[in-house]
Image: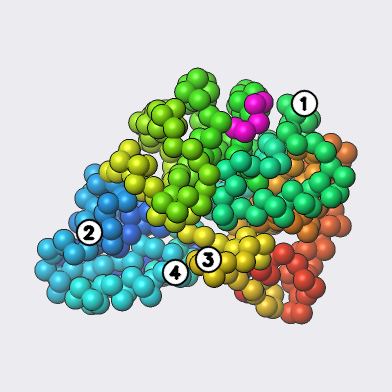
């Protein structure tokens, strides 16, 4: 099933590029609608095909950078290209394309090409992340940030009801577990809590870096200090994602002087290759105005709420899901994107706050036995059935019907 899907993704990409090559010749200007995770890899592909992009177009430039790859980012109501001679390529996720098409028509841009089905996988980084085994590190149980989209009460109840008493992951537990994993596995400091709420998080990151492991980081900056940041800023993270405060205060991130000092520092820092230290940023509603004062023109902050595979109930959620029939995981076809808890337990994925699928314990078992064990194979088998039992995956926004 995975090989067939990979082939379909490649065919979709090639067909799309062939079509764009033909149509783009008919217009004076090519515009990409969007300036984020879909638009940027699309721009790179077009550049490889020698297709010149005149501008990125967005609905609201106030939450975007002023330019990307040296190309201007323009708000749609400020575009002054001759409409009959302008081709717009939609560069957002497929589920948002209808809304974008509606906006384009409202402003008289009728020449557009919709986004293809597998557009997320135009990005080589996404393809790598999807195929690479990942272990998210939950450094502690109970997160003071208590984001609206993170059901901490469900996690705490199920974790502690199972007679587990380890709140903070110890460095020794981290070391023992990580040393059992394959070298190509990505150690992802994220999981079910803010990593830096554990005072040994820095030590864990430095150990993983010393061992030459692939590392990524998802942080709200709560618990991070300027001193900590200076010790990790030269680490070649594969990805760094920043979660910011929002206007509705769905995330309990104190807007202190120290927070903004660290925020400014991390935004202005470059990686060794010259790119920004922050790869992307998000929040749960509109970004807080005080944050925008620091980020405007520098980074784009994305916003969306999902239902955490049915672990949240909220009518304001942007995405809910319940998929019937044969399915596969859009994040990890081999179901090898798992989460390590402080006591060594490994749960299926970052949506499993309710610990419905505990697939093993790295303190007691090998990584190979866990990833090929009966618990994970049960989930795989149920995903292949038309009428499978109730598994977490069927309520997940990453579940794709075959």
Q: Is residue 37 magenta?
A: no
User: Which contiguous range is marked in magenta?
Assistant: 196-200
Residue of label 4: 94
Residue of label 3: 317
Q: Nearer the viewer, mark 1 or mark 4?
A: 1
Q: Can you tell which quarter of the image residue 190 is in?
A: top right
**Which of pointers 1 and 4 lies earlier in the amino acid sequence?**
4
The residue drawn where x is 67% and y is 50% is 152
Closest to the observer, 221 or 187: 221
Q: Position of residue 281 (x, y in %)?
A: 44, 46
Q: Nearer the viewer, mark 1 or mark 3?
A: 3
Residue of label 1: 172
Q: Position of residue 375 (x, y in %)?
A: 84, 57
- Is residue 182 visible in the rendered structure shown here? no
Closest to the observer, 251 or 138: 251
Left/right placement of residue 66 relative to residue 28 reads: right
Q: Which mark is residue 75?
A: 2
**Which of pointers 3 and 2 lies earlier in the amino acid sequence?**
2
Give the CA separation, mark 1 to mark 3: 39 Å
Locate the N terminus by quadrant. Answer: bottom right
**Which of pointers 2 and 1 lies earlier in the amino acid sequence?**
2
Prevailing secondary structure of the magenta residues = loop
- State if disc 3 and disc 1 touch (CB < 8 Å): no
Q: Can you tell which quarter of the image residue 3 is in?
A: bottom right
Q: Position of residue 60 (x, y in %)?
A: 28, 58
Give the CA separation, mark 3 to mark 2: 26 Å
Locate the C terminus by quadrant. Answer: bottom right
The residue drawn where x is 57% and y is 56% is 149
Q: Mark 3: which secondary structure?
A: loop
Closest to the observer, 118 or 197: 197
Rendered image coloring scheme? rainbow
């Amino acid at each position: 099933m995975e090989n067939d899907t990979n082939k379909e993704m490649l065919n979709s990409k090639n067909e799309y590029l062939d079509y764009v090559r033909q149509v783009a010749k008919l217009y004076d200007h090519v515009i990409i609608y969007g300036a984020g995770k879909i638009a940027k890899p699309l721009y790179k592909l077009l550049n490889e095909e020698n297709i010149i992009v005149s501008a990125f177009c967005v609905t609201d430039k106030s939450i975007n950078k002023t330019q990307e790859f040296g190309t201007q980012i323009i708000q749609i109501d400020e575009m002054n290209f001759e409409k009959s001679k302008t081709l717009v390529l939609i560069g957002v996720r497929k589920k948002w394309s209808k809304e974008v098409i509606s906006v384009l028509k409202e402003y008289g841009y009728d020449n557009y090409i919709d986004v293809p089905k597998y557009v997320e996988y135009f990005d080589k980084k996404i393809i790598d992340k999807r195929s690479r085994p990942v272990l998210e590190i939950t450094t502690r149980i109970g997160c003071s940030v208590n984001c609206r989209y993170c059901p901490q009460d469900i996690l705490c109840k199920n974790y502690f009801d199972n007679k587990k008493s380890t709140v903070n992951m110890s460095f020794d537990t981290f070391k023992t577990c990580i040393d059992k994993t394959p070298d190509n596995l990505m150690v992802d400091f994220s999981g079910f809590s803010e990593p830096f709420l554990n005072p040994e998080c820095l030590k864990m990151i430095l150990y993983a870096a010393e061992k030459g492991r692939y590392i990524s980081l998802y942080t709200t900056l709560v618990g991070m200090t300027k001193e900590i940041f200076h010790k990790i800023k030269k680490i070649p993270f594969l990805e760094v994602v920043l979660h910011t405060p929002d206007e509705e205060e769905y995330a309990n991130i104190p807007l202190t002087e120290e927070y903004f000092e660290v925020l400014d520092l991390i935004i202005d820092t470059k990686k060794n290759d010259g790119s920004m230290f922050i790869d992307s940023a998000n929040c749960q509603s509109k970004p807080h105005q005080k944050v925008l004062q620091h980020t405007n023109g520098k980074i784009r902050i994305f916003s969306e709420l999902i239902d955490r595979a049915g672990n949240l109930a909220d009518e304001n959620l942007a995405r809910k899901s319940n998929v019937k029939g044969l399915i596969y995981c859009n994040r990890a076809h081999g179901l090898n994107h798992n989460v390590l808890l402080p006591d060594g337990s490994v749960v299926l994925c970052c949506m499993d706050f309710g610990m419905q699928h505990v697939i093993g314990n790295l303190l007691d078992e090998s990584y190979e036995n866990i990833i090929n064990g009966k618990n994970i194979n049960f989930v795989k088998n149920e995903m292949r059935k038309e009428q499978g039992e109730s598994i977490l995956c069927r309520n997940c926004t990453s579940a794709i019907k075959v």
